[in-house]
Amino acid sequence: MTCKEIRELLPDLALGSSPASGETAEHLQTCSECATKLTGLRSTMALMDEWTVSEPSPYFDVRLQARLREEKEKAHTARSWFAWIRKPALTLAATAAIVVGVMMFRGDQTKGPTTPDATVAAAPGTAVGDLQSLDKNTDLYSDADVLDDLDVQQDNNTATP
């Protein structure tokens, strides 16, 4: 057997719950390290068997219950104070968020889109002035294009008898 296998069996051997097989006993006789560990484990188990637990004080339970009540009251007091301050703080934060959102939404609408009428008119005959007059008269020019297309269609219809 290997030392690893013996180490797994050491607690059972120390307690005496399982007898040592021939291979295990042979390994323990030849391997001083495993034999030393088994001896140390047996002495530890013997000391644990001798140990006795002392009895607690007769007032231990009474003092423990009183201390638990005090800690519970402390935790409840701290929690209730935090809950008291938390609710107004959350309400204030939510109100501030709503106000900021409304202000941003209303701010976009009050600006409004810029119109060509609000811009400064350029002098007629300049490039900028011509572009501004074209922008103002877009509908008129588009109607004129439609009329030109109609004239071309009528000419085509009358040319073919």
Image (cartoon, grey):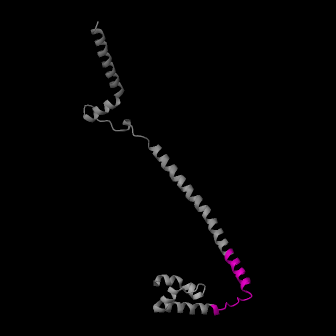
Quadrant holding the C terminus: top left
Residue 46 sits in quarter: bottom right
Residue shown at the point (48%, 92%) measured from the top left? 29
114 relative to 23 in the view: left or right: left
**Foreground pick, 63 / 146:** 63
In reply to whether residue 23 is colored magenta, the answer given is no
Q: Magenta region: which residues? A: 49-72
Is 92 left or right of 128, judged from the image as shown?
right
Q: Give the residue furthest to the left.
A: 126
Residue in the image at 46% along x and 45% along y: 108
Our reading of the magenta stretch's main secondary structure is helix
Percent x, y of residue 139: 36, 26
Q: Across the whole image, how many numbered discs are drawn on residues?
A: 0
Left or right: 32 in relation to 50:
left
Q: Position of residue 103 (x, y in %)?
A: 50, 50
* Relative to 131, residue 33 above or below: below
Which of 85/127 is in front?
Answer: 85
Is residue 67 within the magenta segment?
A: yes
Q: Quadrant of residue 82?
A: bottom right
Question: Where 26 falls versus 135 (above or below)?
Answer: below
Viewer-proximal residue among 52 and 153: 52
The extreme top residue here reads 161
What residue lies at 50% left-to-right and 84% top-to-bottom? 7
Residue at 25%, 31% in the rendered image: 125
